[in-house]
Image (cartoon, helix red, strand yellow):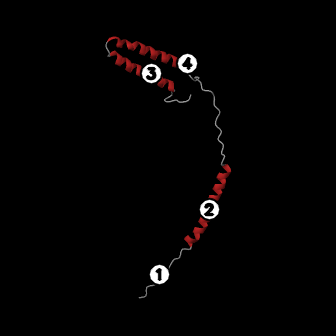
Amino acid sequence: MADVVLGVGTGVFIITLIWILTLALTIILSRATGPTKLGIIPVVLLALIITLVLVFFPRAAEVPAPQRAAQIVDMFFIGRYVLLSLVSLVFLAALFMLLPLHFLEPIYAKPLRTH
């Protein structure tokens, strides 16, 4: 089953669309006068034939064929760990370069009051 919306497939939507169009055409043709009004019969028969063909000759089986589970392979495994180790080294180097600036920040003495 390829596309399923609300638990039904595409064929159900196609059949529904066909019958909605048939209903609209029959309403339009019922307002007509003369022999045009008899156009309702072929429209309904055509919709019935299309519906029967779609129901009795489906394109796919009702039960989908069993599918193998997709196997996910990480092709960039080694490169990812090399990048991780490189970023970790840069982080540690930056941390150890910034720590002395943080801890050894000069604290200037305030002048004493002399009075």
Question: Where is residue 90 shown, x and y percent of the image?
Answer: 62, 62
Q: Nearer the viewer, mark 2 or mark 1?
A: 2
Contact? badges 4 and 2 (CB < 8 Å): no
The amino acid type, in three-letter code, at marker 2 is Val
The amino acid type, in three-letter code, at marker 3 is Ile
Find residue 57 and name its label: 4
Q: CA distance from mark 4 to mark 3?
A: 17 Å
Q: Say whether disc 2 or disc 3 marks the residue closer to the N-terminus.
A: 3
Q: Secondary structure at mark 1?
A: loop
Q: CA distance from mark 2 to mark 3?
A: 65 Å
Find residue 110 and name its label: 1
Q: Nearer the viewer, mark 2 or mark 3?
A: 3
Q: Is residue 111 left or right of residue 71?
A: left
Q: Secondary structure at mark 3?
A: helix
Q: Quadrant of residue 60?
A: top right
Q: Is residue 2 above or below residue 35?
A: below
Find residue 18 and name its label: 3
Q: Nearer the viewer, mark 4 or mark 2?
A: 4
Find residue 90 and name its label: 2
